[in-house]
Amino acid sequence: MEVTERGWVHSIRPLGKILFVVLRNRKGLVQLTFKKKDDEGLFKLAKTLNLEDVIEVRGIEVPDTISKIGREIIPKELKIISRAEQPLPIDVTGLTQALLPTRLEWRPLDLRKRENLAIFKVQASIVEAAEKFLREKGFIQVFTPAIIGGVSEGGADVFEVDYFGKKAFLRQDPQLHRQLLMVAGFEKIFEIGPSWRAEKSHTTRHLCEHRGIAIEMSFIKDEYDVIKLEEDLVHHIVSFVIRKNKEDLELLGVELEEPKKPFPILEFPEIYNILEKLGKKIPYGEDYDRESEVLLWKYVKKEYDNDFFFVNRFPFAVKPFYVMRVDEEPFWARSVDLLYKGLELSSGGQREHRYEKIIEQAKEKGISLDSIKWFVEHFKYGAPPHGGFNLGVERLTMQLLNIPNIREATLFPRDPERYLP
């Protein structure tokens, strides 16, 4: 059967009067076998090829090939579309591994590695699965502003933007506008898009720009409705990736299992006791730290044999003004994090929908009411009980695929030192 393939020269192996060239494209690898006796001119042209040249080949596919690649073509025609300058700045095959900063400097070349394509095919499936699940549940997709006139979290870690001579900011989270859509009566919405945080953090899990699958829904009973939705969503996503990305997971050496439901729910203040038994003392009323996240994961793994778990009822003192407190125990908030393999994937819970309570909590947090008037004023006119969460796309990709650095789960990562390419 005659076929045409286009792609990049992945490897070249001369063997006397035979030349083996491996072509790489998004479908995988295919071996091109050039024989001098078949076409000396074609053989001579093939010998001029360099690694990463872009080529087009037309030929006969070998039906019962013995090639370890899996596919083999005997070329009849070769077209060199684009030459790759030599030497290459990084080794695209990955045999000679460059340091991550160098790879990110040459990210388009680095992304040519088959393993990197596999990572982002999985990431695409994560988003595809989420969209399908949420639409089937009656959620509609929305797009909220990326430029806002006031900070959304009340913190200082924001990127300032000159907005026609006025001070504006890149959003830290589409949180508040999602809530306004609950006031508007949209009831069930989701948004997939970027957020920004101007944190000078150099950890392997932080980015200055990240993407999230953000959900908000109305008429919930409490935060446990939010927990149940997120549990079902994440279970669906992982199951979808297992089915759709089998070859990608094999290439990456990753074995995934469907998460066990229900995900365990750990709650404050009992978390303080759990951590103390594990040798970690956290002062009552304070948030836990990174080490605690890992300790809690090990605890959950041992007690429940699960890598996913929720943390609920954080101290209100460590949470934003818009979260709902537990009325009978206002020290605690209906604030929920989802963790996976010891890393926070999302933050959410039930929001405060009562105008007087929002004002009271903003004052308690020391937030200027003028700065949030654009948000809170609308709650005077009827708001349903609502809640939601924002699931980090890069973090979920990173943890599913056991990637050590979140930058490798990001096409073009943005951190305190990098905003190019």
Image (tube, helix red, strand yellow):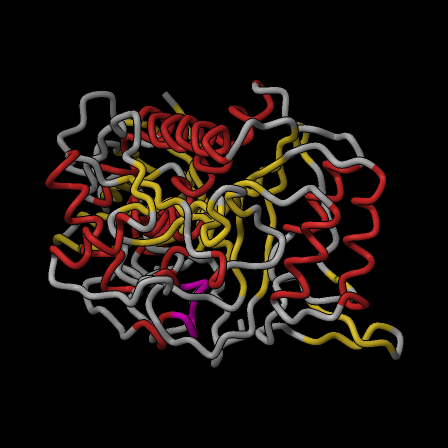
Q: In which quarter of the image is residue 110?
A: bottom left
In this rendering, the answer to whether 68 lies above or below 212 is above
Quadrant (top left, top right, bottom left, bottom right) of the N terminus: top left
Q: Does the magenta stretch include residue 128?
A: no
In this rendering, the answer to whether 57 lies above or below 236 is below
| Residue farthest to the right, as pictured | 164
Give the percent coordinates (x, y) of residue 21.
Answer: 27, 49
> What range of the chain is rendered magenta?
104-109
| Residue farthest to the front, as pictured | 328
Q: Quadrant of residue 173?
A: bottom right
- Count every numbered label the image shows and give the total: 0
Task: Give the residue displayed 62% in from the left and 32% down from the top.
Answer: 217
Q: In which quarter of the image is residue 131?
A: top right
**Magenta stretch, main secondary structure class:** helix
In the depicted view, which residue is nearer to us: 87 or 13?
87
Does 349 sit left or right of 339 as displayed? right
Give the percent coordinates (x, y) of residue 58.
Answer: 42, 36
Give the percent coordinates (x, y) of residue 416.
Answer: 49, 78
Q: Does the magenta stretch include residue 106?
A: yes
Does 167 sit left or right of 214 as displayed? right
Task: Give the residue displayed 50% in from the left and 50% down from the top.
Answer: 330
Task: Give the residue displayed 41% in from the left and 52% down from the top.
Answer: 314
Q: Can residue 24 be seen in this view?
A: no
